[in-house]
Amino acid sequence: MQTARQDILDIFQHTFRVARVERVIEERIHFDKEVMQVDGFRYDLSTFDRCVLIAMGKAAEPMLSSFLARSGDASSRFEGVIAAPDPVIVPSDRFLVFQSGHPSPNRDSIAAAETIVQVLSSLSEKDFVIFLISGGGSSMVEQFLDAGTPLEVIAATHKALVESGAPITAINTVRKHLSSVKGGRLATAAAPAEQLTIAISDVPSGKLDALSSGPTTPDESTLEDVYAAVSKYGVMSRLPSQISDLLRTHSLAETPKRGEPIFGRSRWSVLLDSSSLERAAEARATELGWHVTVDDTCDDWPADEAAVYLVNRLRELRRVQPRVCLLSAGEVTVTVPHGIAGQGGRNQHFVLQAARMIAGEEITVLSVGSDGVDGNSPAAGGIADKNTVERAMGLGSSVDQAIAEFASYPLLQKLGDAITTGATGNNLRDLRILLAP
């Protein structure tokens, strides 16, 4: 029988193999010559003058390449724009590619936004646009409402929001109302063309308008939500003065909402989200003989509070039956104080918080980001067990100090407990696995 450590790594690796973009596109998107079907939506491509693909986000490349491979001979009908974080092989001279920035926008992010708006604005009711959207698009396709806003100001705004400790829905609420390409504004640019959004989601279930800040969906957030968010999470003092002045004077415009005519020819399909991770992990853990419970209660909680909740929840379950596996998807938050230049991310920070609680106890904890990137480190996440704190001390290091300095990666790397996958081409939020034999 494998050890708990071997099992937890097995479960995570199986999950990452199963919840793949390429696999789900093959299962859910079907072509019969020039007729495409996606989750009950049917489109005859021969009836449109132009068929445009807009791919953005961390999964832009695998989404686009898998889609075109699936479309067969119909692939020659498509033209479009790709905004991805890494170099992409251009599928044909009918596509423009931008290597955009993440987590902060770069010059290609601005150029991608300008190009996409130009392409969409040229469409008519006789055209069809398919948006392939995944997480990370908020920074990869960006232009503020004031087109003259310098890139340095845009990047500083994104950085301030990401480091504020606010949950992703609150961060993207602010982003949507600052941007000319978010909060449904790409749908506005594309109208009156037929529109289909195919999503690989890294936001909470039912919050599709938060994915990449909802460029093609009706915005469920309001200006009041923006002002409440910047107040609640202390964002105002972190922002460039040019942006804080807009917020302070309530000078922003509202975003398009549900029921507006621009969405009359829009449809949306979510192929993968964080529940896909949980289903795959649950199946493998069950095969390995673990009793599985899924609990997403702590989604968007601070990492320390999430660690307390999940470890205590595992202990409760363990009192009832042996070999308990607790799964939790979503994201936790970490607020990095000004002046701290640590290295790590929310997953590794969570793992170290849990390590303090489980010292000497037969519990193993793993937390990973499905995109393969955790914060400003090269790791996807980390793993901890009953010996983590003791082993750190044996190496002359301290878990407490690593937490205080927001330097989770150097310690976990030193311990051999950092999990490095490289960029996965996927983005379904994070997965936390806790085992108690």
Image (tube, grey):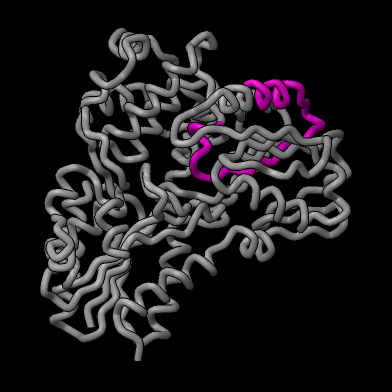
Instruction: Left or right? Give the position of 294 relative to 270.
Output: left
Position of residue 335 measured from the top left corner of the image (x, y, whole percent): 23, 38
Quadrant including the C terminus: bottom left
At x 42%, y 47%, the residue is 203
At x 73%, y 56%, the residue is 37
Q: How many marks?
A: 0
Residue 353 falls in which quadrant of the image?
bottom left
The one nearer the camera, 412 or 107, is: 412
Q: Is residue 169 visible?
A: yes
Q: Is residue 312 visible?
A: no
The one nearer the camera, 155 or 52, is: 155
Quadrant including the N terminus: bottom left
Instruction: Left or right? Give the position of 125 relative to 237.
Output: right
Position of residue 145 measured from the top left corner of the image (x, y, whole percent): 50, 15
36 is higher (above) or lower (below) than 385: above
Position of residue 280 measured from the top left corner of the image (x, y, whole percent): 46, 71
Magenta segment range? 114-140
382 is higher (above) or lower (below) than 248: below
Instruction: Left or right? Give the position of 16 relative to 366.
Output: right
At x 31%, y 14%, the residue is 244
